[in-house]
Image: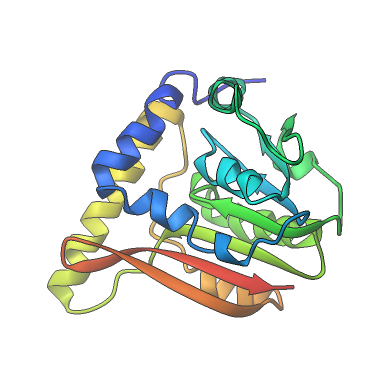
Amino acid sequence: MNDKYKIIGPLYDFLAMIFSFGQIDKCKVAMHEHIKPDDKVLFAGVGQGIDAIEAAQRGAEVTVVDLSESMLNIFTRRTQGRYFTHTIRQVHQDILKFDEYEQFDVVYANFFLNVFPQDMVVQVLEHLSKLAKKGGFVVVGDFSLPTGSIISRLFQNIYWYIADIIFVIMAKNAFHPVYDYQSQMKGLGMNITDLKYFRFLFDNRYYSIRAQK
């Protein structure tokens, strides 16, 4: 499998930290307060996995899926020497080929859907919804839609495109505007139950959306 994150993968969390002053990390774990011990929780495109590790520390039964072997190797190193109630299960696979439908209490897609082109986002989001149990939840953490005045929206868009272009060049991700995940989730019949925003400089730049299937 082609590992697009072989070069930028080791730098991913460091870049996220300096780019957002830690707000991306806060966004990733924003909905963890809802996780209960023994919940079955899936992280799609887990990357270096700070959110998955914290969920495991809360006693969840965690499964992580990532197509990047280098990302999973970093994740493995991060979990070494730690004790969890349940062993974290790792799956090296394309998320669209992962077909354990209706098995998870919560499915996370943190800063993952933005790697896909516009015509694939709803397809991937629908697939993630199918992996959640009936009445289960899908959580998306990502860049929020630009809001406010014309100047505010301009700076928010510039901020997004700087990040997008870096990953277009380094990982061949899709080039696209900020996605409207709330509308997409509602369009798939999900009910948004919680929404948390995270500010950078003077505007909301990130949000975490929790929606029930």
Q: Residue furthest left?
A: 151
With respect to residue 52, does 211 lie above or below?
below
Q: In this view, does 59 lie to the left or right of 181?
A: right
> Residue 93: which quarter of the image?
top right
Q: Is residue 199 left or right of residue 39?
A: left
Image position, residue 105 (x, y; %) = 77, 61
Q: The N terminus is located in which quarter?
A: top right
- Can residue 176 be seen here? no
How many numbered discs, if any?
Answer: 0
With respect to residue 63, does 106 lie above or below?
below
Q: Give me the residue at 53% from left, 49% from top.
A: 117
Q: Is residue 88 left or right of residue 13?
A: right
Q: Is residue 42 left or right of residue 102?
A: left
With respect to residue 83, does 125 lie above or below?
below
Looking at the picture, tell me which residue is in the foreground, 66 or 147: 66
Looking at the picture, tell me which residue is in the foreground, 30 or 103: 30
Q: Give me the residue at 47% from left, 69% from top.
A: 180
Image position, residue 31 (x, y; %) = 54, 64
- Can residue 178 be seen here? yes
Structure colour scheme: rainbow
Looking at the picture, tell me which residue is in the foreground, 147 or 55: 55
Q: Give me the residue at 53% from left, 51% from top.
A: 110
Image position, residue 62 (x, y; %) = 72, 44
Image position, residue 45 (x, y; %) = 60, 41
With respect to residue 109, does 135 lie above or below?
below
Q: The C terminus is located in which quarter?
A: bottom right
Looking at the picture, tell me which residue is in the foreground, 155 or 117: 155
Q: Give me the residue at 59% from left, 53% from top.
A: 109
